[in-house]
């Protein structure tokens, strides 16, 4: 009988030790997982509160080359014999663009050593089509840059103080165009409508394209 009591005592002791060991392991496991879960939730909450935060090369200490801005003008030093016409031909711009950029008049002489600001051509007025016919009349604007060109806030002006202001529109590829029709219509990606009930353009009239800062970017004489 004593032998059975002893065996029963050792059996209970073994069960108790096993239970304590199992409980200890479970507690440690729970604490470890809770810590990992807490860190994960904190990270998720941080990203949720700051959705604009993204990993960039700068964050990773990878040097990022600075973007090189496209100059708005280049400076030409006048040499003997230079005229506005010859400079315009050299840089593929119009005489009117040179005059507007520098505040000169056509009659103003140029002297050797003068500095003439030449606007960089990254956009042009390609043509004016359908002059005098309201249903067909339009101005075609072409992107000459290698990157996309936003015309938002730019203006198209004639010599009679008529002004068209561009909405949020972008020419995405080099050589791409948008057309500004004189008549009333619904704008599309490629076709914009001025909203006039009479034609705008006349033969010999100057068409001026200005950017959102008011700088002249292209000038065109209607044939």
Image (cartoon, rainbow, N blue to C red):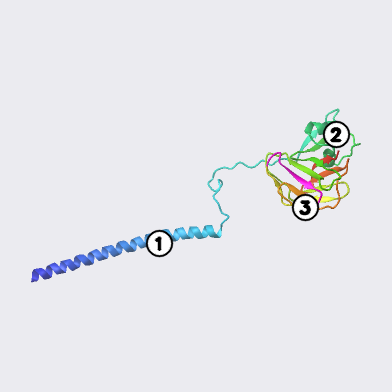
The secondary structure that dominates the magenta segment is loop
Q: Residues within 10 Å of mark 1 (few under 14, many from 20)?
A: few
Q: Is residue 184 magenta?
A: yes
Residue 30, image quadrant: bottom left
Distance in Å between CA atoms under marks 2 and 3: 40 Å
Identify the magenta region: 173-185
Asked if the residues shown at circle 2 and circle 3 are in contact, with their CB atoms under 8 angstroms apart, the answer is no
Q: Which one is in front, 98 or 197?
A: 197
Q: Which one is in front, 177 or 54?
A: 177
Q: Position of residue 7 (x, y in %)?
A: 13, 67
Q: Residues within 10 Å of mark 3 (few under 14, many from 20)?
A: few
Q: Find numbered disc 3 in the image and state the secondary structure of the residue it sits on.
A: loop
The residue carrying mark 1 is 34
Residue at position x 53%, y 57% from top? Answer: 47
The residue carrying mark 3 is 185
Q: Is residue 186 above or below residue 118?
A: below
Asked if the residues shown at circle 1 and circle 2 are in contact, with their CB atoms under 8 angstroms apart, the answer is no
Q: Of label 2 and label 3, which has the lower sequence position?
A: 2
């Amino acid at each position: 009988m004593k032998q059975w009591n002893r065996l029963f005592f050792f059996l209970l002791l073994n069960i108790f030790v096993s239970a304590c060991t199992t409980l200890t392991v479970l507690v440690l496991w729970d604490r470890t997982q809770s810590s990992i879960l807490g860190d994960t939730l904190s990270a998720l909450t941080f990203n949720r509160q700051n959705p604009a935060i993204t990993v960039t090369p700068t964050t990773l200490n990878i040097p990022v080359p600075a973007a090189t801005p496209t100059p708005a003008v280049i400076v030409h030093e006048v040499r003997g014999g230079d005229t506005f016409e010859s400079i315009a031909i050299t840089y593929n711009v119009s005489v009117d663009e040179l005059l507007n950029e520098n505040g000169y008049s056509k009659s103003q002489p140029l002297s050797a050593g003068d500095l003439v600001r030449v606007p960089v051509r990254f956009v042009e007025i390609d043509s004016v089509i359908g002059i005098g016919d309201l249903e067909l009349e339009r101005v075609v604007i072409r992107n000459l840059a290698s990157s996309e060109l936003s015309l938002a806030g730019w203006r198209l002006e004639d010599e009679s103080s008529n002004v068209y202001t561009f909405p949020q529109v972008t020419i995405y590829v080099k050589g791409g165009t948008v057309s500004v029709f004189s008549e009333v219509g619904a704008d599309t990606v490629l076709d914009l409508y001025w909203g006039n009930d009479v034609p705008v353009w006349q033969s010999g009239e100057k068409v001026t394209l200005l950017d959102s800062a008011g700088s002249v970017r292209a000038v065109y004489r209607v044939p």
